[in-house]
Image: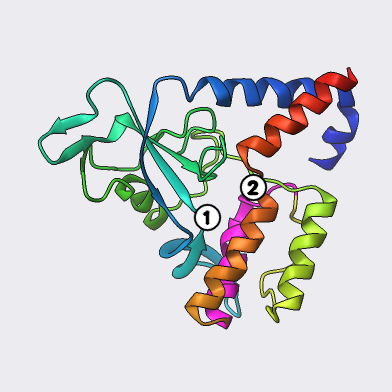
Amino acid sequence: MLKREKEVPKDLLTYLEQKQRQVQAASFDGLHHFVSYPEREVKMKIVRNTPEGFQDGFYSVIIPAVDVFTRGKSPLLRPGFLKRDALSFFVSSTKEAFPFGHVYRSSGSICLGSLFVPSAVPEYAPAMPLETLFLSNDRNLNHGDGHLSVNETEARAVVQLLSDAGVRLSQGSFMEEKKNLLKNDVIWNLSADVAEQKPLPEALAVMASVYAIIFKTAKERAQEQDQEEKEE
């Protein structure tokens, strides 16, 4: 992975990143904000390195804040129920789809594949499709093209923040895995460590700070894009 990245010209990488941002921005056309969830604790199936080897299990993890959007003129399937396919899930205050297998990176909508997600979603529980994916996490990033990475500076900032908070990472080096935080559930294992070692209010605060480093707001990304265009 790292070798291929080194072989790709920097100008091409910049161009591809700009095109991805344009696609993400365009995906917001026709979307309507429905509800926002703060950082919260959820149950998720993740793979952990145990004394018996790598094993799947259900753990408490803390996910980033989520904005739920609807698309189309009529997102209701019937009174009290939303259409699953009319929902999109984004990290709050960004234009980044929720980073998870079976979530389209370009639109934030659900890419089903072989997983069953009910087509009728209770209006009072619009995050149900996403939470269903958490419980059946198969880490198939080919379904939806999910990706999450940080650069060297951001990775060091995360490690330092956790060290200052007294959190010990149990699943290997975050620095070594920074280019693919979804592979082997790296980011979710990190949040599981925080949830396990800290009382919930403190764990939520720690992970909010971690996610503030990892996810940049739409405004910050727009400023970066403007700067890049000025330098061209």
Identify the residue position indicated by label 1 in the image.
Answer: 64
Identify the residue shown where x is 71% and y is 72%. Answer: 162
- Which quadrant is the C terminus positioned in? top right
Disc 1 and disc 2 in contact, CB within 8 angstroms:
yes
Q: Is residue 64 above or below residue 171?
A: above
Task: Provide the secondary structure element on which disc 1 rests.
Answer: loop
Look at the image and say whether residue 10 sits in the magenta stretch: no
Q: Nearer the viewer, residue 195 or 112?
A: 195
Q: Which mark is residue 129?
A: none
Identify the residue position indicated by label 2 in the image.
Answer: 215
Magenta stretch: dominant secondary structure:
helix
Q: Residues within 10 Å of mark 1 (few under 14, many from 20)?
A: many
Relative image position of residue 90 (x, y in whole percent):
48, 40
Task: Provide the secondary structure element on which disc 2 rests.
Answer: loop
The boundaries of the magenta stretch are: 179-197
> Label 1 is placed on what type of residue?
Pro
